[in-house]
Image (cartoon, helix red, strand yellow):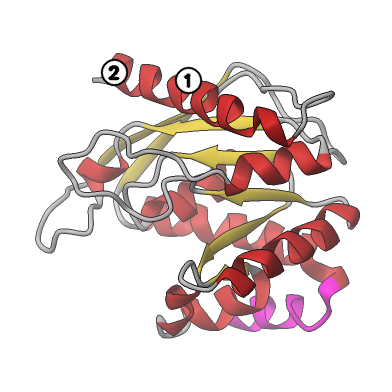
Amino acid sequence: MFPFLLISILKESWYPLFFRLARVWARCILIGMGFRYRIEREQTPKPNKSYMFIANHTSMADIMLMLVAVKNPFVFVGKAELAKIPLFGFFYKRTCILVDRSSPESRRAVFLSAQKRLKQGLSICIFPEGGVPDESVLLDEFKDGAFRLAVNHQIPVVPVTFADNKKRFSYTFFSGSPGKMRAKIHKFIPTEGLTVEDTRRLNESSRRVILSQLKIFG
C-alpha cells in the first residue's frame, strides 16, 4: 500500500483519505499477524464530529487496533521518538502530532497543532499514560494533556479499553501469540461547561472507566 499511502500525505487536506487507507492497512496487519479482533461499542461516534479518543497503552498493536475500532478520522498525538522507526516513522511524523515530553515548548506546540486539526473537523487520539507502562502495571496514572485539550475545545472524551494487546503483542521479545483482541468503546464523557479546574476530575473519571473494564476483562 506504500504508493497509495505516499500519495495521500502529499496534501494536508487529503488526510481523511490517508486515514481510510491506514484503516485498511491496520486491518491487514492485524489479520496477517494472526489476530482476530472484536469491537464492542456502548456508544458510536457520530460522523463529522470531533472527539478526544483515549485508551490504555500496552502494545505497538494499540495503534492498529485503534485505527480499526474508530471510523472518525483522528490524529494521533505521540512520542517524537517513534518517528525514528524505519518506514513507519516516515508516515508517523507526517501525519501525527509529535511531542517531546522533556520539552515544555513542544508540549505547548501540541495544543496549537491539535487546535488546527480540530478546526479541520478531525478528532484527536492520545494514550494518556504517557508511554507504555511496565507489564506488571495494569493501568498507569494518566497525564492531564488529553483532558485539558478536551476541556479547552469542549469535545467529548471517548474512553477505549484494550483487553488483550499486552498478552498478544507486548514489548517483551519472544512473547505473545496469535488470538483474539478485544476492545470496548465506552459511553462518551461530555465536557460542555467544564473549565480547566475540572481537568483532574475528568482525568480520574476517565481512568476509572478503563480500569473497571480491564478488571472485568480479567
Label 1 near label 2: C-beta < 8 Å?
no
Question: Looking at numbered disc 1 in the image, what kind of residue is underneath it?
Answer: Val
**x 38%, y 46%: residue:** 57
Label 1 SS? helix
**Image quadrant where residue 179 sits:** top left
Q: Is residue 162 above or below residue 185?
A: below
Percent coordinates x, y for residue 76 in the rendering? 60, 58
Magenta segment range? 1-12
**Image quadrant where residue 183 sits:** top left
Give the number of the disc on residue 215. 2
- Please say whether residue 60 is one of the residues in the magenta stretch: no
Left or right of residue 41, residue 149 in this image: right
**x 51%, y 32%: residue:** 160
Q: Quadrant of the C terminus?
A: top left
Seen from the viewer's position, the closer of residues 90 and 138 is 138
Give the number of the disc on residue 209. 1
Left or right of residue 102, residue 42 in this image: right
Q: Quadrant of the N terminus?
A: bottom right
Percent coordinates x, y for residue 14 in the rendering? 83, 70
Percent coordinates x, y for residue 4 in the rendering? 68, 77
In the image, farthest residue toward the front: 197
